[in-house]
Amino acid sequence: MPAAERAAFLDGACHGNPARRARLEALLAAANHEGRRVNLYDVASGRRLYSLPDEPIVIWWLAWHPDGRRLAVGRENGDISIWNLPEVEAAIARAGLAP
């Protein structure tokens, strides 16, 4: 993504919230794999950091909490999962799966 386009995306996604901007500059979430998986990427390098477990139902939306530490995953049936990313990252490290 070109730098100007990336900056415009981050500005729009953050709604002027500096904490959210800082988190988004470090990570970018994307749903893929037939809309059932959330991957988290290092935006600077484009490298995938890790994936959350596959969802049983198609993902319709993702939303960051303003603190930049939690991610809501909305599914087509109306259910929502809230992921505390520091806890996810700690579990990955404990399991020896960190990249």
Image: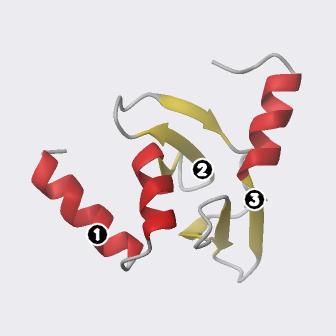
- Disc 3 packing (10 Å; few <14; some 14–19; many ≥20): some
Q: Nearer the viewer, mark 2 or mark 3?
A: 3
- Residue 1 shown left or right of residue 92 in the figure: left
Decide which of tag 1 and tag 3 comes sooner along the chain: 1
Tell me whether circle 2 and circle 3 mark residues in contact (CB < 8 Å). yes
User: Furthest residue to the front?
Assistant: 18
Distance of mark 1 from mark 3, alpha carbons?
Answer: 23 Å
Distance from disc 2 to disc 3, alpha carbons, whole Å, reads 11 Å
Would you place residue 32 above or below residue 71 in this image? above
Position of 5 with respect to 36 (left or right) is left
Badge 1 marks a residue whose secondary structure is helix
Instruction: Report which quarter residue 2 is drawn in.
Output: top left
For disc 1, the marked residue is 11
What residue is disc 3 on?
A: 83
Going by the numbered disc 2, the residue's amino acid type is Val
Please identify, in this view, whether the residue under mark 1 or under mark 3 is nearer the observer: 1
Residue located at (87% from left, 22% from top): 95
- In the picture of the structure, the residue carrying the numbered disc 2 is 38
What residue lies at 75% left-to-right and 59% top-to-bottom? 83
Other residues around mark 2 within 10 Å, as few (<14) / some (14–19) / many (≥20): many
